[in-house]
Amino acid sequence: MGLFDEMLKDSESLFLNPEQLDFDFQPKLILYRENEQKYIASCIKPLFQNRNGKNLLVYGSPGVGKTVSLKHVINELEEYDNISSIYLNCWKKDTAHKMALEICEQLNYKWIHNKTTDELFKEIKNILNKKTAVFVIDEADKLTEMNGVYYILEDIYKKTIFFITNNKDWLISLDERLKSRLILEEIEFKPYNLEQTKGILKQRLDYAFVGNVWENAAFNKIVEKTFELKDIRLGLFLLREAGNIAENSSSKKININHVEDAMKKLDEYKTKNPEEFEEDLNILLELIKLNSGKTIIDIYDLYKKDNEISYRTFKRKISKLSDNKLINVKNTVSEKGGKTFIINYSSMKKLDEF
Ligand SMILES: Nc1ncnc2c1ncn2[C@@H]1O[C@H](COP(=O)(O)OP(=O)(O)OP(=O)(O)O)[C@@H](O)[C@H]1O
Ligand SMILES: [Mg+2]
């Protein structure tokens, strides 16, 4: 074998299409969510008859296919000319103005400069009311104000609004006026069972890797861990990490040792939106790590020393960390008999479990 043959052989990758393991990769087939997707479609159906659709709250824990299912529905709607669809992620678009700018971008409306939120929504109204519209408002609990939702409710005549959240209690926090106008139906996305978890990860594995590089025991270990943690995203992370570790050790197969090493890295996997994870949240997380088990007020007092922050904003940060499973928040009774919360740092716990 020639010099280059040997070198190329060594650099052969175990991966075929690694992008299949990206968290925002949209697979063509969404497995095991047929019923949920049918229900979602039934909420949109009135729009086809030029009537107002139903609004729906989609809730469930992280990594159970809420976003991917709704995006799939939106993609299917592209075929139909009289329905526009808008997808908004409130991690990034948390105010009415940011929502308006994002909607304009999706509608390809370019004359946004120096326009107020009111003016932008007027333009949006003109465009969207020529047709009917589907809105997916993802991570809805991250909205810092509800004005954008009011605009959509009032200005757009024939529409369906889907709200997605991890936390169904978010609904309780909405004001009554908004709730009574939305008339939200609800659907829960339950975690996948073991067989379903395996099916979803196998589908990705088949596309992402070269054939026959996975040892059965190694893949099964990832399936079991993913099922235990109830988050498909963690499974995708483990598939990629184990593949990288095997590749770096020039192994032609991915075996159980590679998976075990990958699991040790789970702790580094901090959040589903790492690029959006604000620096100050990391600082707060470090503080909680050092003070795990204290009450929310104690942590607030410590954090306040170096940061000017209201309790309300502080609580929002705590929710973000909790939604991302980085901390645990438990109800308890304070020494004075009132209700309070105990904050525990949880990603170390995750690591300890392995
Ligand atoms: N039924 C499924 N078929 C194929 N892939 C899936 C399925 N369910 C989840 N996934 C994959 O798992 C990952 C997480 O799914 P998704 O982003 O939809 O979770 P989510 O429920 O929106 O979670 P979060 O509440 O944290 O936003 C995605 O990469 C997605 O492609
Ligand atoms: Mg999501």
Image (cartoon, rainbow, N blue to C red):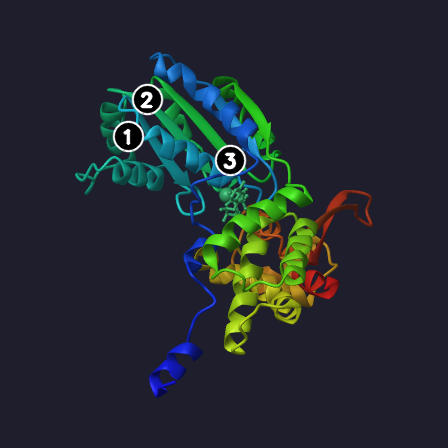
* Residue 130, disc: none
Dot 3 beta carbon under 8 Å from ligand 2 = yes
Dot 1 beta carbon under 8 Å from ligand 2 = no
Residue found at x 50% / y 29%: 37
Quadrant containing the C terminus is bottom right
Q: Nearer the viewer, residue 219 or 353?
A: 219
Q: Residue furthest front?
A: 1
- The residue identified by callout 3 is 164
- The residue identified by callout 1 is 121
Q: Find numbered disc 1 in the image and state the secondary structure of the residue it sits on.
A: helix
Q: Which mark sits nearer the N-terminus, 2 or 3?
A: 2
The amino acid type of the residue labelled 1 equals Phe
Residue found at x 56% / y 50%: 202
- The residue identified by callout 2 is 155
Residue found at x 36% / y 81%: 5
Q: Nearer the viewer, residue 318 or 309?
A: 318
Q: What is the spatial separation of the Cα atoms under label 1 and label 3, in whole angstroms?
A: 22 Å
Residue 174 image offset from top left, x and y in percent: 54, 29
Residue found at x 62% / y 46%: 197
The amino acid type of the residue labelled 3 equals Ile
The amino acid type of the residue labelled 2 equals Asp
Residue 344 image offset from top left, x and y in percent: 71, 57
Q: Which mark sits nearer the N-terminus, 1 or 3?
A: 1
| Front tag of 1 and 3 | 3
**Would residue 294 be found to the left or right of residue 327 on screen?**
right
Q: Which mark sits nearer the N-terminus, 1 or 2?
A: 1
